[in-house]
Amino acid sequence: MERGARTVLWCTGLSLALVTSVLASATIGPVRIPVEVVAKVVLDAVSVPTLDLVGGSGKPTAAAVPITQVGIGVEFVSPFDLSAPETSRVIVTQLRLPRIVLAAIVGFSLAAAGTVMQGFFRNPMADPSIIGVSSGAAAGAVAFIVFPLTVPFGLQGMAFGGALAAAFLVYLLATEGGRTPVATLLLAGIAIQTFLGAMISFMLLQAGWQLQEAVYWLMGHLHSSSWDEVVATLPVALLAFCMLAAYARDLNVLLLGEEDAHSLGIEVERTKRVLLGVASVITAGAVAVAGVIGFVGLIVPHVMRLLVGPDHRILLPTSALAGAVFLVVTDTVARTGPAELPVGIVTAALGAPFFIYLLRRREVHAL
Amino acid sequence: MIAVENVGVTLGGESIVEGVSFDVPRGSLVGLVGPNGAGKTTIVNAINGLLAPDEGRVEIDGDPMPRLSAREVSRRVATVPQDSSMSFEFPVRDVVAMGRTPHRSRFERESAADREAVAEALRRTQVAEFADRSIDEVSGGERQRVILARALCQRSPCLLLDEPTASLDIGHGVRILRLVRDLVSEGKAALAAIHDLDLAARFCDELVLLAEGEVLAADTPREVLTEAHLEAAFDVEVAVTPHPITGAMSVTALSDRPTRERSVHVLGGGQAGAAAIVACRKAGFETTAGPLPEDDVALARARAFGIEVTTAKPFAPITPAVRREVARLVRDADVTVLASDREPYYELATRSERTVVLGEGSDATATEATTASATSENEAGTDPTRAEGGAVLDSRAEDGEVEAEERKSDARRRVWVANGDDLVAGIERVLDERDEGEN
């Protein structure tokens, strides 16, 4: 089958799987809410921006409720009114959906970044944290929790800033004379990760009563997620993903090796900078709101590579969508157990055995 | 198309290539030959922009390289690298289509021109038949064709090939080069770093011989692939002969050259001396030579082999210093080959216990002319060429002590006459006799 058609087919399928898993996840919790009620709530919450031709009277449908007025003549209109029960509406829209949607965004971001990093490093062990992004975020977050700091955007701001600072430091360490050898980058990443690990351990020793909060953050979590976090993360994730997608073909050519890529007209160092930068930003966005969630960025790209092949034009979008589905599912497991677990524990506990199974079947062996 | 001017590249403080200049005109295939580490790949990388030369410049079609972006270079020059590491499972067709990268902008979709270029490249390289297989499943020869197909897709006027035939069997190697020849005859300019000298001689219009980062020779294969050039470049004995079938020059490295414990000193220059030096070296004797005039052909040979040689001024009597030096070499050598009928050489030859005289026009393969008892002073005295030996005797007087020593061994001197073709047999013969005598 033609690649384009395959891409569309896979993406459509995975998008449907994502919608399904989101809706199914929203039914699950201490209060069971039937799927049709969830569907009603979601449809009710849908609001469509329309051109207001008449002027605020909500012409298109009789039940239209103008929510916000943005500029002149644009009006948000909810096309549905299926009158779902109020308690269900609050549980779904205020408690469950923000967390589920955030899980989808985080999974999407980590899997996309993981795909790019594995291609970039031509190394099957690469994941989004390989250049120190996660360690930087963790160091920033723990510092914020342990020490009385005042920074813009609080914990998330510190984590995001720490992630980017660590990635930039690794990049600077590995760059000499305008060239950034991939192997040096890998080693510099490991050195910085180790160093930041020591810093984090030290800070945890000083933590006192905040220790539990810090450890909980480090394990990766999605509890108490809010729509604010969704609104902050979604644009970063989408924008960064679009940039990565634009470089999918360059990433394919980079797989041939840097010298070959150069002779095929790729400005290798510039492309590497763009890919590293954007992949770091998308990872930092995810890690800042969800803590260090391991394994999503490592195994999801591997599994998708088995299914769709190594071409990043199809691998990148499918991995991102599959990552979203994976994290929605694992987070649902995490929050429905007898005691709520940090989702990082679940991804690792479910992901590692599955990965070992693939490894033993020799299906995952290289890029 | 490709002009390399005085290019020098220094990597890590070490000069890799220096002062390299050559041209690759449109419609010709130039071979870059030389030993491993001579700088062939460095030159290729300087041309495709992977390395920026520290000195000199590279021009592609009149455009100096540093001004071109990677994309612009890749539209002008396609490179077939020495080895492409591909351990992932791209279908062959996709790998070939990556050759269109220079012609497509980031958001452009595959055009009809792209598809047409890919189809043509697949067909010409005969890759089409396995285009749907994964690149990590094809053999080495097939992979090399895939990479060549990828380069063809670039539709560039210049083609660089770095060891295109390394790791290929002879059939695939010849097929690849024949295809490159076809492309060249359509007007491309191609430069190929090749270590197989026979293939280089057969397919290239011109060769550039690199050694230790410098151009040793640049000309037609016939001019470049000479024994002296190759022995200097590769530091190994070689024989260059026209190939019986292709007619191209064929090079055989005598890597298993016999190394004999014995040493030979060649007295005399000119063609005879040069031939004797070559024969002795090829046979594996430790060889010395001299005295040789500074413009002598034998001296050029001796220098190409890097052997110890004593030089003398042309058309002048041998000075006492030179004579002493040569006398030392003759005494140190196990056998002396006398390749001259000039007076002073005869005299010097008498200092050796074993001498082989290159006889002219002799039908005999190795004629025993004189043996132990019947040698030397008397016979030499009666030799007509020694009639005016006064000067020789004068010079002898200078180191009388040595002379006395030499005289003692006269009783055991052996002299053979051999013609040029049987020189080595002659040398072996005198050596055998000495050994017998010792036993």
Image (tube, coloured by chain):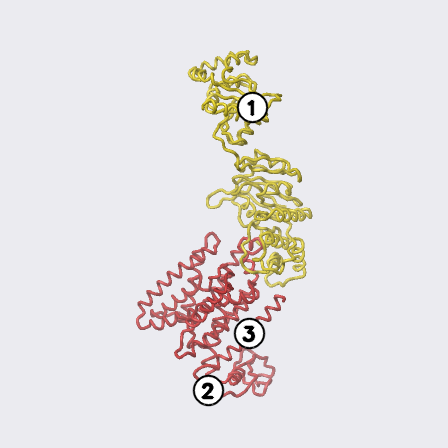
Chain colours: A red, B yellow
* Residue B292 rendering spot, x and y as whole percentages: 53, 24
Marks 2/3 same chain:
yes
| Mark 3 residue type | Ser
Q: How far across and down, in percent of the image, does residue B98 sit? A: 60, 58
Task: Give the labeled residue for mark 1.
Answer: B269
Q: Chain of mark 1?
A: B
Above/below status of B54 relative to B383? below
**Which of disc 3 and disc 2 is earlier in sequence?**
3
Q: CA distance from mark 2 to mark 3?
A: 28 Å
On the same chain: label 3 and label 1?
no
**Which circle marks residue A15 in the picture?**
3
Chain at numbered mark 3: A
**Is the residue B363 above or below the residue A151 in the image?**
above
Between marks 1 and 2 in the image, the one whose residue lies nearer the viewer: 1
Alpha-carbon span between mark 3 and mark 1: 88 Å
Label 3: how many residues lie within 10 Å, few (<14), some (14-19) or many (20+)?
Answer: some
Amino acid, disc 2: Thr
Of marks 2 and 3, the one in the foreground: 3
Q: How many marks?
A: 3
The x and y percentages for residue A84 are 51, 87
Q: Give the quarter of the figure containing the C terminus of chain B.
A: top left
* Label 1 – label 2 distance at C-alpha: 113 Å
Q: Mark 2 belongs to which subunit?
A: A
Q: Nearer the viewer, residue A5 or B127?
A: B127
Q: Which residue is mark 2?
A: A87
| Discs 1 and 2 carry the same chain letter | no
Q: Single out the residue that lies furthest toward the right.
A: B186
